[in-house]
Image (cartoon, helix red, strand yellow):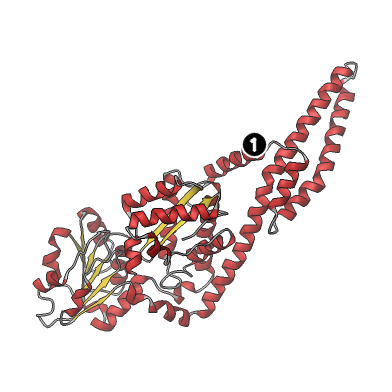
Amino acid sequence: MAMLERAAVTGDDLVKLLHEVNDCAHVGETAIVSTCNRVEVYAVVDKFHGGVSGISELLSRHSGIPLDDLSRHLYVHYEDRAVQHAFAVACGLESMVVGEGQILGQLRQAFRLAQEHGTLGRELHDVLQQALRVGKRAHHETGIDKAGASLVSVGLEVATAHLGPLDRVRALVVGAGSMSGLAVATLGRAGAREIVVANRTFERAARLADSAASPARAVELSALDAELAAADLIVSCTGATGLVLTADRLAARGAGADGRRRFLLDLALPHDIDPAVRRLDGVELAGLDDLRTAQEAAEAIGPEAVEAVRRIVRDEVAVFLGAARAAAVAPTVVALRSKAAEVVEAELSRLTGRLPELDDRARKEITQTVRRVVDKLLHAPTVRVKELASAPGGDTYADALRELFDLDPKAPEAVARADFRSEARDVGDGAPTEREGGAR
């Protein structure tokens, strides 16, 4: 986890890394997922080893971790395995707490960020967008949500074991992001005695406090010390790069000396709360490390739901890859038909010049006959090549068509680009996709 903290990227650093990876040699498309327990780079590369090497070096430079040390903690998936991994991540199968739904929103944010900054192309767009759809399907059709609660829910269950029912506690939530919002909502449903939201931007804290089902109020971050003394439960999840709460700061507000029990839940990465607070009497701290065992518990609760989601992922991956391979040959088929149409038109024009005495009726019959002959000759091979292309190695059939009919390589590429521009205009609130990615 310490290694992950150092590798985590947020805000402007995330945008900078996104552009640097996309500008890296051998990389054509990029999206980055950076959450509390994962940093993953999805990329379309023209050379696997060159792409992995370049991305690894950039991660090393951004994190300050020597490449040799960092490499031991990296994992790499390629082609089919990259697609399978992306789908599994979207379903919550790779989360610290199996089935947690936060990852769908985080994946969508990564997609939109890449889209906004122009690092998303056809392949990555398709993979990530389909991953979001698969994630939604898994949560809708199975009990995966029950198999694994969110990090916040698990953390608050641990807090309940230490403090007792949450309807008796005064809770202080530091930060106003998505995790803090989930904490406020969960505490509200549990009937917390009072909820205080502290944030650097008071307006965001106020909006979050207004949404709570329990009595809640907002304070500016500068008023944090005044709230620490009264809080029984402190949940912290900010984007700070340094510690927000230290043992000395808590001790100055009575923690460890006033005989009260306190529970601190640190959901931030890097950590917001100094682990030294555990030395204070009556103070318990749970961080992301402490929630890892919740994953095993979740799998024990819902093994059938987990297996159902795994089946969905396997089926969806097979369908997606088959469709992707078939779609890859489509531009070549379109280019072939386009070339055939050009040949037909050229020959018909030549015929008109040689036989100017043909009347309109005869010319029309000849034109329709020639076009039907060409269509019938091309129909069987083009249908068959699409069927064959859906199987592994199907891209070789497109290569064969291009070679046999001497197609200009730029023609299929132009068809593919035009098709993607058309599809991109139709994309709404979906999310991401891709056929060849390196998930790290």
How many numbered dots are placed on residues in this image?
A: 1
The furthest residue to the front: 68
Q: Is residue 253 left or right of residue 16?
A: left
Residue 382 lies, with reference to residue 411, above or below; the image says: below
Q: Amino acid at mark 1?
A: Lys
Q: Quadrant of residue 55?
A: bottom left
Q: Residue at x 32, y 58 (%)?
A: 64
Q: Residue at x 62, y 66 (%)?
A: 315
Residue 398 lies, with reference to residue 437, above or below; the image says: above
Task: Give x and y (percent) for residue 203.
Answer: 22, 53
Q: Quadrant of residue 366?
A: top right
Q: Residue at x 57, y 44 (%)?
A: 423
Q: Is residue 142 visible?
A: yes
Q: Residue at x 48, y 56 (%)?
A: 52
Compare residues 306 and 45 and report the one nearer the observer: 45
Compare residues 76 and 64 and report the one nearer the observer: 64
Q: Is residue 211 left or right of residue 130?
A: left
Q: Is residue 210 left or right of residue 132?
A: left
SS class of the residue under badge 1?
helix
Q: Is residue 262 visible?
A: no
Task: Give x and y (percent) for residue 413.
Answer: 63, 40
Please give the residue where the numbered disc 1 appears in the rendered image: 410
The furthest residue to the top: 357
**Quadrant (top left/top right/bottom left/bottom right) for the N terminus:** bottom left
Compare residues 83 and 183 and report the one nearer the observer: 83
Task: Give x and y (percent) for residue 367.
Answer: 84, 29
Q: Is residue 301 left or right of residue 331?
A: left
Compare residues 183 and 336 and report the one nearer the observer: 336
